[in-house]
Image (cartoon, rainbow, N blue to C red):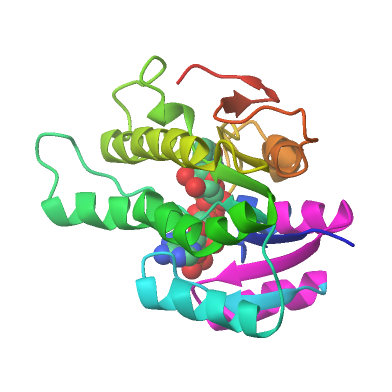
Amino acid sequence: MARTALVTGANRGIGFEAARQLARAGLDVVLTARDPDAGRAAAAELGLRCEQLDVSSDESVRAAAERLERDGVAVDVLVNNAGVLLSGGILDVDDELVRDTLEVNLLGPLRTARAFMPGMIERGYGRVVNVSSGSGSLTEAGAYTPVYGISKAALNMLTRQLAFAAEGHGDVKVNAMCPGWVRTDMGGGAAPRSVEEGVDTIVWLATLPPDGPSNGFFRDRRPAAW
Ligand code: NAP
């Protein structure tokens, strides 16, 4: 039976392409989006199931998980892709911008993990892919996009903690990845990578064999510096 993957923020950009490629790889894909109309349009284009899911809302994540459970859909693969890049200098940034960033980029993946990882652990199979960034690497980080970098560094640590929580519970793997600089609304037109290139490592991590890695951070299918 085909595995089921759920992708957050999949109405456009890297998430949309991840949904497309995972479906092409033979998975049943649930395309999720915070805006139901945008989600429906994107899902219709790919012929996929769509769920409204705003990662910044506990209620929205819980309601989506309940609808899937009611329909007998078990999520085997979770791609935490939804993210925001809000600009602010580190010494003059508003608290609100920091909160809004963490709400999506850190608490979002935590909410979806809480909703879907217990089922993976119970069934003994799961793949969680957290779409992070080199901006969140403590060794690679530069002065650009500081708040975004802080949120992605936190996402990397969340990845490690989720991977620790999955240890000893069968074949459940949790990894983070950096797609590189990709041409999307967030990445802009000058970015060197296509969405197809950006998504490659996501699909690889989403479909890892049992002897594949967990608790890692990857770019181009190779370990990246945390
Ligand atoms: P994008 O084109 O701006 O798309 C972001 C997606 O996230 C959109 O679908 C957006 O939905 C969704 N989203 C934002 N807040 C959400 C929320 N509260 N709930 C659900 N969905 C939400 O960005 P992208 O370039 O595809 O980025 C995807 C991921 O890759 C992000 O995590 C980003 O940090 C990471 N990344 C991107 C690059 C790059 O160069 N592009 C590099 C490194 C990492 P709406 O359409 O409703 O806004």
Q: 220 left or right of 25?
A: left
Q: Is residue 205 above or below residue 38?
A: above
**Which image quadrant for residue 8?**
bottom right
Closer to the camera, 107 or 210?
A: 210
Q: Position of residue 138 (x, y in %)?
A: 35, 20
Q: Position of residue 114 (x, y in %)?
A: 45, 59
Furthest-left residue in this view: 92
Overall secondary structure of the magenta section: helix
Q: Residue at x 39, y 30 (%)?
A: 136
One can see residue 135 in this view: yes
Q: Is residue 116 located in the magenta-colored stretch of the structure?
A: no
Q: 86 left or right of 215?
A: left
Q: Residue at x 46, y 71 (%)?
A: 61
Tell me the magenta residue range: 18-46
Tell me the quadrant of the picture where the N terminus can be found: bottom right
One can see residue 84 in this view: no
Closer to the camera, 90 or 176?
A: 176
Q: Is residue 29 located in the magenta-colored stretch of the structure?
A: yes
Q: Residue at x 69, y 25 (%)?
A: 220
Q: Position of residue 176 (x, y in %)?
A: 54, 35
Q: Is residue 180 above or below residue 155?
A: above
Q: Position of residue 192 (x, y in %)?
A: 64, 31
Closer to the camera, 24 or 209?
A: 209
Q: 34 left or right of 120?
A: left
Tell me the quadrant of the picture where the C terminus can be found: top left
Q: Is residue 132 above or below residue 215?
A: below
Number of numbered discs present? Answer: 0
**Which image quadrant for residue 196?**
top right
